[in-house]
Image (cartoon, rainbow, N blue to C red):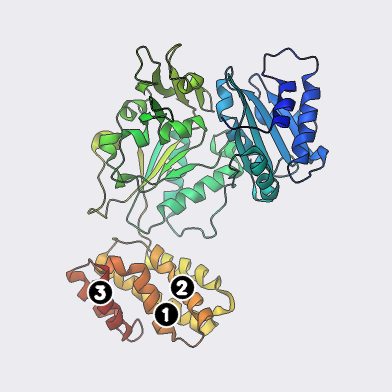
Amino acid sequence: MTELPQRLMDELAEVGPAEADHDDPGAGLRQLEVLLATNAGSLPIDKVVAVRVTGDDELVEQFRRTGQLADAVLGVALVDLRADDRASAVSEEFWELLVAPPPERVSVGLVFGWKATGWEAVWLGHSGAGESAASVLSEFLGIEAEEVSPIVEPKYRLELDERVRRMLKVSVRSRPAVMLVGPPGTGKTHLLTELVAEISKDPPAHGLTRLRKPMLVTPDESWTVRELVGGDTVDDRGRLRFSPGHVLEAIQRDRWLILDEANRADLDRIFAGLFTWLSGQTVEVGRASVEPGASKILLGWADTPHSQVIGVSRLRRGGVSGGPISYLAGTDWRLLGTYNAVDAQRVFRFGQALGRRFDHIPVPVPGVEAFIRALRTRLDDLGPALGEPEKETLGSILSAIYRSHAEVQGDAMGPAALLSIPHYVAAGRRDDGVVPLAQLVAEGYLSSMGTWLAVLGDDLDRLGEGLRRENVLGGEWGWVHSRLRELQ
């Protein structure tokens, strides 16, 4: 347990746990607000608002009822962790307050939890605007502050068939699990980011009630069921306890889970009970501990939009008494992923049984005209680093390279790497304005595409025939080719 300063413990004692009988618990909250205001960089007292979280009300609503939310900088929630399982995820509810538009938002969120041994500071978070106050509080409380970032719309919009976007939107509205499938560089993760940003602006328009920033993880070949779902691990006292994996953690936080490049792990092997769960059933995914009679860990579905976790306080105690511990994904919850079926040397393939649990949305390699439109936005964004004639030359070279790739490799590689080259060229010009444009293009091409070129085999010679043309890379192709052996 975090050792709180004694004067803070004294003020918290005046508030007490949820069921304590106090003459005026509100008075204790006000004294706590004064103490925290003093130790958060000398905030004015009217910038701090504290609530005791009880009942089923949303955290935002409890703060709203105080009438102080519009002026607050620091929001404080006191939660009885013994009695209210929902309280273990109260820190996630601060997301809404930390990233909400003004006036109903705070810059710093702080959660105190009451356990059998007393009060503990369990979470401290801040938006960028609250970094200074959070830093002071972090030192005062002895806990690390977490920065909460909002859902941000990508700077560039993908150039692709609008039917792909529609398929993705409809699938996410209607199915709990959706996978984007396509070659490397087609913008699968970018497309999910676009969708999340669009939904976050108006969730009801997409058939949802709300959307928090999703959790994004990248699997790898070392993953087991424990990383994805959960499993036994040794706690800080040397005991075997169940530790939730990414799926259970995302449900507890009521945040979507995105598996980026999902098939870098052998999901057919590690999905375990998720096969049955994704078909709408409740499954047992473990036990709280190895003790006899330990609570079952169940994974199921809620009939409400928001996810729920029932009995999670028993998980902290090892689950040796009481009923099951249930993780229930809400009807708004989604499991999304991206799948690269081309890079066969380093990825696994989905089996048919797993594939049926997901909607699959194909994300094709865009045509040359779509690439040129996307390239134009990158060139326009370069500012004065390059003059217009050089931008036109650069655009012509990169378009010719893209055409050559399409002629030789078809749809094996998307445009993402080539679209990064304009910014490389602009950065090179800022460092040294006399470097020839052709050299910077060749260097950017090698650094972004070299590892792919190095394993092309016979296709490399065919590609070189197009790239060595004078209006493409010209003599610089020979330099690029000579450097590929170091990248194999």
**Quarter of the rendering containing residue 92:** top right
Q: How far apart are marks 2 and 3 (CA)?
A: 22 Å
* Mark carried by residue 467: none
Q: In this figure, which residue is indicated by the disc labeled 2?
A: 424
In percent of width and height, residue 385 lies at 55, 79
User: Mark 3 — residue?
Assistant: 463
Q: Is mark 2 on a helix, strand or loop?
A: helix
Label 2 vs label 3, nearer the camera: 2
Q: Which amino acid does label 3 sit on?
A: Leu
Location of mark 1 (residue): 440
Separation of residues labelled 3 and 1 (CA atoms): 20 Å
Q: How crowded is mark 2: few (under 14 residues within 10 Å), some or many (20 or more)?
A: some
Is residue 133 left or right of 88 when viewed as pictured? right
Badge 3 or badge 1: first in the primary sequence: 1
Q: Which residue is drawn at 73% across and 26% down?
A: 10
Does the CB distance between marks 3 and 1 fall below 8 Å? no
Residue 30, given in percent of the width and then of the height, sits at 80, 29
Q: Are marks 2 and 1 in contact (CB under 8 Å)?
A: yes
Residue 163 in sight in this render: no
Q: Nearer the viewer, mark 3 or mark 1?
A: 1
Mark yes or no: residue 449 visible: yes
Q: Picture coordinates of residue 290 (x, y %)?
A: 34, 19
Image position of 210 with respect to 84: above or below = below
Name, please, the residue furthest toward the front. 6
Left or right: where 388 falls relative to 280: right
The secondary element bearing badge 3 is classed as helix
